[in-house]
Image (cartoon, rainbow, N blue to C red):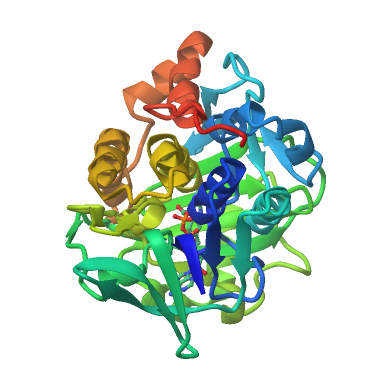
Amino acid sequence: MTDPVVIVGGGPAGMMCALLLARAGIGVRVLEKHKDFLRDFRGDTVHPSTMEVLHQLGLLERFLQRPHENVDGAQIRVAGVDYTIGDLSHLNVAAPFIAMMPQWEFLDFLRDEAEKFPGFQLEMEAEVTGFTEEEGRIAGVQLADGSHRRASLLTIACDGRGSLVRRQAMLPVTQLGAPMDVLWFRLPKHPHNGEKLRGAVDTGRMIVLIDRRDYWQVAFLIPKGAADAVRAKGVGWIREQCQAAFPELDLGGAGGLESEADLFLLSVALDRLDTWHRPGLLAIGDAAHAMSPIGGIGINLAIQDAVATANLLWQRLAMGRPADDLLQQVQQRRLFPTRVIQAGQKAAQDNVIGAVLSGQPITRAPWPVRLLNRVPLLRRIPGRIIGLGVRRERVESPLA
Ligand SMILES: Cc1cc2nc3c(=O)[nH]c(=O)nc-3n(C[C@H](O)[C@H](O)[C@H](O)COP(=O)(O)OP(=O)(O)OC[C@H]3O[C@@H](n4cnc5c(N)ncnc54)[C@H](O)[C@@H]3O)c2cc1C
């Protein structure tokens, strides 16, 4: 089977890239190893920058018909005192809020829209196990069942932080390090308390509650590699920590954290490829740069990568010619925002999260948090950085 473009991985990067290329009239086949998009505790935050892309494509209204909650502000509790630190409501965009939408809903939506274009093909349960080479360039992939899919123009690795290009050492990666891991789980939600992201920071403890309408999605930060030690303390201890951080909420009852099986470990990684491409092959999204969960920007960066890829490559691909000489331009375009955001995440990890988790006494909020709380206008700055990112991409690839 030969297609002009083969995409490995049907996550946000792969599905958006496929949608844009198919929309521009280019044949594209997505290979996704799972049988559906149902995965819990993945990035569920769709930021204004991503919704701007959907708006440019004329899809925003349909997207917002899918189940989601709007979040336009953030609160943090430090040593028992509440601070409001972010405000997205003033952004001058079509959707000035974060849409909290299960990732499978978002991916189902992208699939449904992409399927309207004849060039789009999606194969589920199609696990890629290797790349094939012809005359020194990548020319497609091999699947777990031994079959092959040939890419006459380009293969794009969108297979996330465990990408084959990393596992098979095809493209070297630089680790930036992370002092923490995250245990994700649910806690029951009783009366409605307003849709805001809530964080709580005390000595040795850092917890984030995300309002998912029917339940709280909880991120429980732990020192890197400490998952077994924390599990050994028991889920009762974890629940007590959450209740102590948010005493005004009733976090007890059925449907929450009951056994170890309800805990999902995210091993936090912060890294990026030194080179995102080689002849015939390009890596984007988490495959090119694994992001820390700070700011919940992973999906949005992946979407921006996909838009830049389509913008820079569609013309050449639509002519039926390889785009190997343009791949460096994709890296150049997207490396700057990746570097800036990763530097911000690393600073937050090392100076705040690492310090808190190491047990450094927390007696009051650092001055930037107090300042943001005192001057509402300033809260628009983190709102803007988180909501719109660093280098926004506009869709330039056409509707064929
Ligand atoms: C637990 C967790 C929580 C997160 N929370 C947030 C958040 O709140 N907000 C946020 O923005 N980001 C969050 N992220 C990060 C976010 O999920 C990623 O940054 C984003 O999904 C990256 O998109 P991607 O398409 O590059 O990669 P991925 O979403 O990782 O998609 C890769 C796809 O490739 C498929 N695949 C992998 N290997 C193969 C193979 N060999 N063959 C075929 N298919 C393959 C996978 O099944 C997957 O569908 C979180 C990540 C995790 C793991």
**Which residue occupies the foreground of this view, 154 or 51?**
154
Residue 7 horizontal/vertical position (percent) = 47, 61
Which quarter of the picture shows residue 328? top left
Asked whether residue 301 is in view, the answer is no
The picture places residue 330, in percent across and down from the top left corner, at 31, 40
Residue 15 seen from this side: yes
* Residue depicted at 74% across the width and 44% down the height: 68
Quarter assignment of residue 262: bottom right
Residue in the picture at 21% in, 70% down: 135
Left or right: residue 161 versus residue 256 is left
Looking at the image, residue 46 sits to the left or right of residue 154; the answer is: right
In this rendered view, identify the residue nearer to me: 284 or 114: 114
Residue at the spot 48% in from the left edge and 13% down from the top edge: 374
Count of numbered tags: 0
- Indicate whether 325 appears above or below 238: above
The answer to whether residue 359 is above or below residue 143 is above
Give the position of the C terminus as an image quadrant. Answer: top right
- Residue drawn at x 76%, y 37% is 64
Relative depth, front residue between 39 and 156? 156
> In the image, residue 100 lies at what x, y percent?
66, 44
Percent position (x, y) of residue 206? 44, 50
